[in-house]
């Protein structure tokens, strides 16, 4: 591959990788991401040097004025940090596209490299996935390739090669510049050995960084970065919920959280409880926040149920939740279940602005959370907390007009059922069998939208079904409330965890039944999942598993994880008692940490040796040359040997042109044939001209003949 084409390809690989890393964060609009990618691809096939208009100053001034106006428009409304962040990212995309379409000289490439590095920093602030780590490795390798070729190209453009021409008719010797385009289009400057060796250097750098990451002592340091990942949008988790007034996320596959059930057999479906709504009025639900109590975190433990016995805590099941940044304060817990305690990371208490609280209906809130959170839930399955008589009255509230109209319909549905359990089951079954599920929003025709749903439309999404069942139960004096959370059946077999996506958002009902506590009823008809391609589904599961592993073993690598790794390493070297111990005497085990240290030291030495060999290989790497080049070097070596016998020894750092000029200055008769020989060699070596073996052979013979005819002078080294 030609040098200029190789430099262009690796440069585009570098800047495109940085942009893709920024694009995958989700911080850029879809139209901007696709448009920037198309413009980057189009600029690859565009050569600005073939358009004289783009090389003039007037064009540059006009372009810079346009960029200034666009920058003012992007930052003019930046009243908040998010607006400033969005404007800065869009300006980076604009600058990158402009520089790629204006590649006039080496400096434009350098400015594009700087813009790509700023994009990389922006992606680092907000992205933390395995795909990001893989793209970072590609970016590092591309940087090594690009900067090396960039340095070589700058040297070629700034230091033109000169070819020596002997003087004519007794005049002084002349020098003429060699066209740089010949060298840039040469295929002999770089090749596969160079690219493979530098890629190996990048891989060794990553391995060394991994070892330092694992062995470097960890500290409990809490840092609040100025920028965070954009909060994922959510519906139904705010203080109030109005039927038919929010957007649907049914088709959004963005991951909200990942849930592990260590030591448990995974169920067919996992239900996660988020927020509960107590009061209903004219199609609007509101939460019960008056009794919210702050929760204290003691060494990462939050005790939720102080009345739980030791026997109950011993039967508690553990649920690991890896929650992404969500624009909601709710922390999700498994349902049904009675939450006993939460286990939070040590850094949770040190982050500014974070407040943890709980409501009387069992909702857990984390106010001010802006970053991903990994927490553990200890709960008793199939057990719901008790409710005091004062709280029960709240879940029976219903306006007299609504109660009167709904009670007649509810009694027709339940028929001869008397018990609260039978009535709740018949109402739930009636909604499932006689109503349809749809994600299309429809506008209510009257003040109370639940009448439109029950009497006219008879279709809706899950919140309409949950609301209808809750108000029908209340019309029969059965305490009930609606709950919003997530219901997922997507089990990742690669990582052994449940994947919860935005499209898994769901609503259901909790009814307080005599002798059973709060019981879950889900009146929404079961939905058949759309057909999925098995290959794409497995690939998505594999990528989710990589992201999960990257978060667990890299992002959450702290002091405790380092201690566990150290214990595992120490267990490989069993301890033994001292030689002087008596039989039956209890002797403390001798430390064997030095063995682990020795093993790590040997591994580091081996890795350093491999790196040293790669470095030597990088220095000694020889670019692939053709047979003509090898023959040209052999003939040139014969000429240098002939001159050495005449006393002209080539000094250290002396080029062939300098040696030829020294012969001219000494008026040596061998100067003209040697100058022509150097000219033929440079034209072939750097100008891609074919080697004229007959002419080169004639010049060698002429040089040797002149050396024999004229006696050698005193030896002379270059000054």
Image (cartoon, helix red, strand yellow):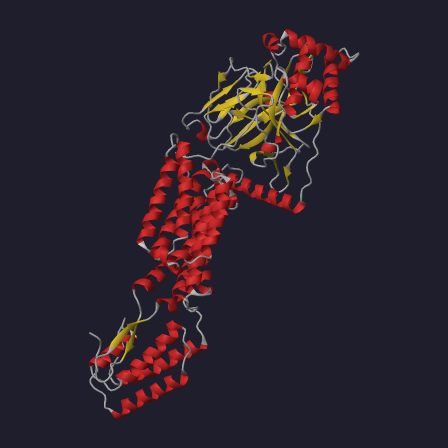
Residue 159 at x, y = what percent? 29, 65
* In this view, 623 is above or below 572: below
Q: Residue at x 38, y 74 (%)?
A: 685
Quadrant for the C terminus, please.
bottom left
Image check: 469 left or right of 119? right
Q: Is residue 377 above or below residue 558?
A: above
Q: Position of residue 62 (x, y in %)?
A: 34, 48
> Which of 216/94 is in front?
94
Q: Position of residue 236 (x, y in %)?
A: 57, 24
Residue 80 visible at all: yes
Residue drawn at (26%, 78%), measured in percent from left and top?
A: 660
Q: For the view shown, which residue lies furthest in the right direction? A: 416
Residue at image point 30% right, 91% down: 705
The answer, for residue 581, to whether it is visible in the render is: no
Q: Give the percent coordinates (x, y) of residue 257.
A: 56, 33
- Quadrant in which residue 393 is drawn: top right
Which quadrant would residue 119 be assigned to in this image? top left
**Count of marks overlaid on the render:** 0
Which quarter of the picture shows residue 477? Answer: top right
- Viewer-closest of 530 and 497: 530
Left or right of 91? Residue 430 is right
Q: Nearer the viewer, residue 706 or 310?
A: 706
Q: Is residue 378 above or below residue 518?
A: below
Taking 707 as reference, is 90 above or below it?
A: above
Residue at image location 68% in from the left, 20% down from the top: 453
Would residue 556 appear left or right of 319 to someone viewing this image? left
Q: Nearer the viewer, residue 599 or 24?
A: 24
């Amino acid at each position: 591959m030609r040098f200029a084409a190789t430099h262009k390809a690796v440069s585009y690989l570098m800047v495109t990788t940085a942009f893709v890393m920024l694009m995958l964060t989700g911080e850029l609009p879809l139209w901007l991401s696709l448009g920037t990618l198309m413009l980057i691809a189009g600029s690859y096939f565009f050569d600005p040097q073939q358009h004289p208009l783009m090389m003039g100053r007037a064009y540059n001034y006009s372009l810079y004025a346009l960029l200034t106006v666009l920058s003012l428009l992007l930052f003019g409304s930046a009243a908040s940090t998010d607006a400033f962040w969005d404007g800065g990212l869009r300006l980076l995309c604009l600058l990158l596209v402009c520089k790629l379409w204006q590649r006039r000289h080496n400096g434009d490439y350098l400015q594009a490299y700087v813009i790509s590095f700023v994009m990389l920093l922006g992606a680092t602030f907000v992205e933390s996935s395995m795909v990001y780590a893989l793209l970072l490795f590609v970016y590092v390798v591309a940087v090594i390739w690009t900067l090396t070729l960039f340095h070589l190209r700058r040297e070629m453009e700034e230091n033109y090669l000169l070819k020596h021409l002997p003087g004519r008719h007794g005049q002084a010797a002349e020098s003429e510049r060699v066209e740089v385009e010949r060298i840039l289009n040469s295929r002999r400057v770089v090749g596969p050995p160079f690219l493979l060796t530098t890629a190996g250097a990048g891989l060794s750098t990553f391995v060394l960084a991994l070892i330092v990451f694992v062995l470097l002592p960890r500290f409990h340091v809490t840092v609040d970065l100025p920028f965070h990942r954009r909060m994922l949008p959510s519906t139904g988790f705010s203080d109030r919920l109005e039927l038919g007034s929010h957007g649907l996320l049914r088709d959004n596959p963005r991951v909200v959280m990942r849930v592990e059930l260590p030591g448990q057999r995974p169920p067919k479906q996992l239900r996660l409880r988020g927020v509960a709504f107590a009061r209903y009025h004219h199609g609007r639900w509101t939460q019960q926040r008056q009794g919210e109590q702050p929760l204290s975190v003691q060494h990462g433990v939050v005790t939720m149920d102080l009345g739980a016995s030791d026997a109950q805590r011993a039967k508690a099941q553990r649920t690991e939740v890896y929650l992404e940044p969500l624009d909601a304060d709710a922390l999700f817990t498994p349902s049904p279940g009675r939450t006993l305690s939460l286990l939070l990371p040590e850094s949770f208490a040190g982050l500014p602005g974070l407040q943890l609280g709980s409501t009387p209906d069992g909702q857990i809130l984390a106010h001010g959370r802006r970053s991903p959170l990994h927490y553990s839930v200890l709960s008793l399955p199939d057990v719901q907390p008790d409710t005091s008589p004062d709280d029960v009255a709240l879940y029976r509230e219903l306006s007299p007009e609504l109660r009167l109209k709904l009670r007649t319909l509810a009694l027709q549905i339940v028929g001869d059922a008397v018990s609260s359990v039978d009535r709740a089951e018949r109402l739930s079954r009636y909604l499932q069998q006689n109503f349809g599920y749809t994600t299309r929003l429809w506008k209510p025709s009257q003040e109370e939208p639940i009448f439109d749903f029950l009497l006219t439309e008879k279709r809706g999404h899950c919140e309409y079904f949950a609301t209808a069942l809750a108000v029908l139960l209340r019309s029969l004096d059965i305490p009930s409330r609606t709950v919003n959370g997530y219901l997922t059946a997507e089990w990742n077999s690669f990582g052994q965890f449940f994947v919860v996506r935005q499209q898994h958002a769901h609503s259901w009902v909790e009814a307080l039944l005599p002798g059973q506590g709060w019981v879950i009823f889900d009146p929404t008809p079961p939905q058949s999942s759309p057909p999925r391609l098995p290959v794409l589904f497995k690939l998505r599961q594999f990528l989710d598993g990589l992201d999960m592993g990257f978060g667990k073993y890299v992002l959450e690598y702290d002091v405790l994880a380092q201690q566990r790794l150290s214990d595992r390493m120490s267990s490989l070297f069993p301890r033994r008692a001292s030689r002087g111990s008596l039989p039956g005497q209890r002797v403390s085990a001798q430390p064997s940490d030095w063995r682990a240290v020795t093993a790590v030291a040997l591994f580091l030495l081996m890795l350093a040796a491999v790196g040293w060999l790669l470095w030597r290989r990088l220095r000694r790497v020889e670019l692939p040359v053709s047979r003509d080049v090898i023959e040209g070097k052999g003939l040139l070596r014969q000429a240098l040997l002939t001159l050495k016998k005449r006393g002209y020894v080539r000094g250290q750092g002396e080029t062939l042109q300098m040696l030829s000029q020294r012969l001219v200055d000494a008026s040596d008769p061998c100067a003209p044939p040697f100058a022509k020989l150097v000219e033929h060699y440079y034209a072939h070596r750097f100008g891609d001209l074919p080697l004229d073996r007959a002419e080169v052979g004639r010049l060698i013979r002429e040089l040797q003949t002149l050396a024999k005819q004229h006696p050698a002078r005193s030896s002379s080294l270059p000054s």
